[in-house]
Image (spheres, grey):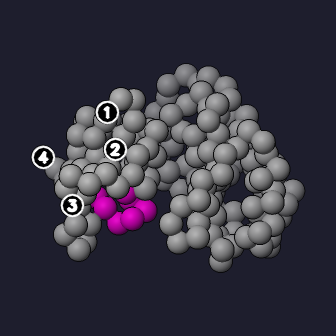
Amino acid sequence: MLTFHQKIEILDSYPQLQRKDVSLGRVNYHYEESLHDKKTVAFHLHPNGNGYVYAGLLTGYKIDDKGFVNIRDFSEEELRSLLDASIASLSEPQVRAVPAGGKKTKRLAAETSWINGEGQKLTLKAEDDLWYLYSSLSLEMAFETPDEAKEYLAEEGFSQLQD
């Protein structure tokens, strides 16, 4: 198993990926030239060794419902192979198909409300080609795609309120 620092070194060796430090010491890597809504290639690499790489457009990998593969126990060769395939898949246009799992994805409205188990409410709004997350009137975060926003909200324990 690679350490957190070894995984970071491998990901840093890909000049087409941009590192984004996120909460709790975790790190994401984005592929800004992606031809798809998905730009996150590596998600929540954690100092404990856990982390995920996007494989939603690939076959032969055990993916979660968001299209990510857990890379906790990957060797350097396995990680590089997955990263190469992930970047290549995001570099090619794809015909719209039903996502993995056979469900059609529900598009987000221009403004949606979200709540967590503690009753905290957030509002996600589409403005100027970005998705902004607000707590009351305070801006909390901005996202490039609605999928990125939904991933973050789900990871943080929020679910969408039904209007």
Check contact, mark 3 vs mark 4: CB within 8 A. no
Q: Quadrant of the N terminus?
A: bottom right
Q: Residues within 10 Å of mark 1 (few under 14, many from 20)?
A: few
**Disc 4 element:** loop
Q: Which residue is mark 4?
A: 163
Q: Residues within 10 Å of mark 4 (few under 14, many from 20)?
A: few
Residue type at tag 2: Tyr
Q: Compared with residue 63, is residue 72 higher up or lower down, i.e. above or below?
A: below
Residue type at tag 3: Lys
Q: Note whether residue 9 is visible.
A: yes
**Disc 2 element:** strand
Question: Which callout, 4 or 2, points at the residue further toward the start of the chain?
Answer: 2
- Observer-side mark, 4 or 2, equals 2
State the extent of the magenta-drawn residues as a range. Answer: 153-160
Which residue corresponds to the image point at 62% horizontal and 23% vertical from the top-left?
93
In the displayed structure, does residue 71 sit left or right of residue 158? right
Q: Which residue is mark 1?
A: 127
Q: Nearer the viewer, residue 154 or 16?
A: 16
Disc sitting over residue 121 in the figure: 3
Q: Compared with residue 4, is residue 44 higher up or lower down, i.e. above or below?
A: above
Q: Quadrant of residue 43?
A: bottom right
Check contact, mark 1 vs mark 2: CB within 8 A. yes
User: Is 163 contained in the magenta span?
Assistant: no
Check contact, mark 3 vs mark 2: CB within 8 A. no
In the displayed structure, does residue 99 sit left or right of residue 53? left
Q: Which residue is mark 2?
A: 132
Q: Residues within 10 Å of mark 3 (few under 14, many from 20)?
A: some
**Disc 1 element:** strand
Residue type at tag 1: Glu
Residue type at tag 4: Asp
Distance Cα–Cα, label 1 vs label 3:
19 Å
Distance Cα–Cα, label 4 vs label 1:
20 Å
